[in-house]
Amino acid sequence: MSKITIPVPAEFNFETNFQFLQRSPKEILHRIDKNRVIKLLKVGDELILFSIRDGKNKLRIDFLQNEPSSLAKETIKLFVEEWFDLKNDLKPFYKLASKDDLLKSIVKKHFGYRIIGQPDLFESLIWAVLGQQINLAFAYTLKQRFVEQFGEKVEYEGQHYHMFPLQEKVASLTHDQLLALQFSKQKANYTIGIARAFVEGRISKTKLKSLSLLEAKDELMKIKGIGNWTANYALMKTFRHPDAFPLEDAGVHNAIKNLLGLKSKPSLDHVKKIFKKYKGWEAYATLYLWKSL
């Protein structure tokens, strides 16, 4: 069994981020096994099963089945760095937050917490669509059924490990196949439509990466089912745009209400005024406000 290691910055806490990955018992795209996270990815034709564990100032990546190619190892390394946002220097954010009445106690309590991203833009968009207008528990149920039915998998030590369905597979599905999983007609339509947009080249991570936030958002919102909230979510979780944050998000409003001791949720204008202080770090301010809930 081969391994690689990835150095982590001082502003990274494995345990805090590990807890985030355990937020749902129905999560199917990684498995928590004692003190490690196990995940399956595909690189070219290689299905790579690997684990991540804390290695004191570094992350240790163990490859659990076949010996991966050099390209696959490098791809996994880059994926993990992106997944845990390891290349982002949070020192300026912590300096700003330490002087802010709203954030200072939260960042002190949860120091080292990072935006656990979704490097796969397709997965990020479909997950956002699945979560629209339903509770989080049922969104995880839908994702679990969707991944089990249409994603690739491997077996290791008696457990199955799953990969998010490929765009080409989803683009070829019928609406009835998704309705059978309890997708609404709207979610089925949006899911297949987004997959077809990827397959037809109307949207891609590479294409959006070169665009500004507003340009990227405009491109995403041309796709049926992707509104402002969904576009912001994907741009935050996949591209780390610092100002791609869901300003209308109920969780943000509730967090501000609780932290300021307000009798009712703040107005949108009040939220905008608060977030002016966080220019360049809006996504991380959002993350910590969510964490306070």
Image (cartoon, rainbow, N blue to C red):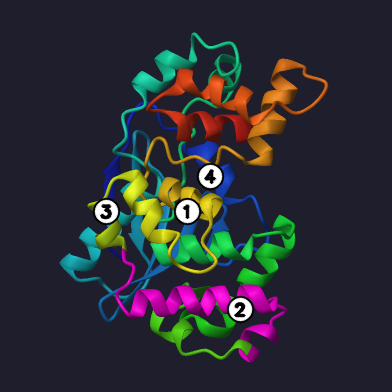
Question: For the residue marked with disc 3, what is the amino acid?
Answer: Lys
Residue 293 visible in the displayed image: no
Q: CA distance from mark 1 to mark 4?
A: 26 Å
Label 4 crowd bin: few (<14), some (14–19), many (20+), radius 10 Å: some
Q: Which residue is mark 2?
A: 188
* Count of number-bearing discs: 4
Q: Which residues are magenta?
A: 176-204
Residue 196 location (% of width, % of height): 41, 80
Residue at 63% x, 73% y is: 187
Residue at 50% x, 50% y is: 233
Which mark is on residue 162? none
Q: Which residue is mark 4?
A: 18
Q: Which residue is mark 3?
A: 209
Vertical relation: 273 (above or below) 207: above
The verdict on residue 284 being magenta is no
Q: Which residue is mark 1?
A: 231
For marks 3 and 4, give the one nearer the viewer: 3
Q: CA distance from mark 1 to mark 3?
A: 14 Å
